[in-house]
Image: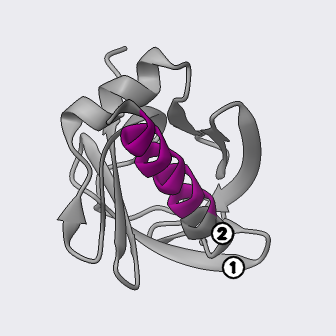
């Protein structure tokens, strides 16, 4: 059973890499709340199937975390299990390697959706 769970968690890791490879420069001025801050992955789903909180905690206990820092200067860093990716952002998209990824932000929760995959990050306490 443990092996099956580890394989499932590794599949989650692969999904995260795939989603960010298909991702979306510079913070602009609008009435939307600013997403500037540090975030930790708090939820994920693929094809309508959500990753459980227990699975996310297991990943974390194995030292496999996904974090993101969105900076005021329109840049950011996504850390996927120790591998970092730089990006830029604007009011509607993250841009990674020239690819745009739309996002939503409600003041504390940052969500990216692509096809049937969704990743939700929660803003860390300052």
Hey, which quadrant is residue 49 in on the image?
bottom left
State the residue at coordinates (52%, 34%): 67
Q: Nearer the viewer, residue 98 or 3?
A: 3
Residue count near mark 2 (Cα–Cα under 10 Å), binned few <14, some 14–19, many ≥20: many
Percent from the top left, x then y, of residue 100? 61, 78
Quarter occupied by the C terminus: top left
> Image height check: is 45 above or below 4?
below
Q: Does the magenta stretch include residue 104?
A: no
Q: Quadrant of residue 78?
A: top right
Q: Which residue lies under the disc numbered 1?
A: 99
At horizontal 46% and vertical 53% (from top left) the residue drawn is: 12
Examine the image and state in which quarter residue 14 appears. bottom right
Picture coordinates of residue 52 (x, y %)? 21, 43
Q: Where is residue 48 in the image (x, y as percent from the top left)?
A: 20, 73
Q: How crowded is mark 1: few (under 14 residues within 10 Å), some or many (20 or more)?
A: some
Q: Is residue 123 visible?
A: no
Image quarter hosting the N terminus: top left
Cα distance, mark 1 to mark 2? 5 Å
Is 90 situated left or right of 58 in this image?
Answer: right
| Display coloring | one colour
Overall secondary structure of the magenta section:
helix
Q: How many marks?
A: 2
Q: Is 111 situated left or right of 50 in this image?
A: right
**Observer-nearest of 56 and 19:** 56
Rendered residue at 33%/59% (across/down): 111
Is 87 drawn above or below residue 107 in the view shown? below
Report if the CB atoms under discs 1 and 2 are less than 8 Å apart: yes
What residue sits right under mark 2 in the picture? 95
Magenta residue span: 3-17
Element type where label 1 sits in the image? strand
């Amino acid at each position: 059973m443990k092996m099956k769970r580890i394989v499932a968690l590794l599949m989650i890791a692969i999904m995260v890499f795939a989603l960010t490879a298909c991702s979306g420069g510079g913070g602009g001025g609008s009435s939307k709340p600013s997403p500037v801050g540090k975030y930790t992955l708090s939820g994920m789903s693929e094809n309508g199937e959500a990753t459980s909180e227990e699975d996310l905690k297991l990943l974390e206990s194995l030292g496999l975390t996904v974090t993101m820092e969105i900076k005021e200067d329109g840049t950011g860093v996504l850390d996927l299990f120790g591998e970092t990716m730089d990006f830029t952002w604007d009011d509607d998209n993250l841009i990674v390697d020239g690819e745009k990824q739309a996002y939503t932000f409600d003041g504390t929760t940052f969500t990216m959706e692509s096809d049937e995959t969704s990743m939700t990050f929660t803003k860390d306490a300052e």
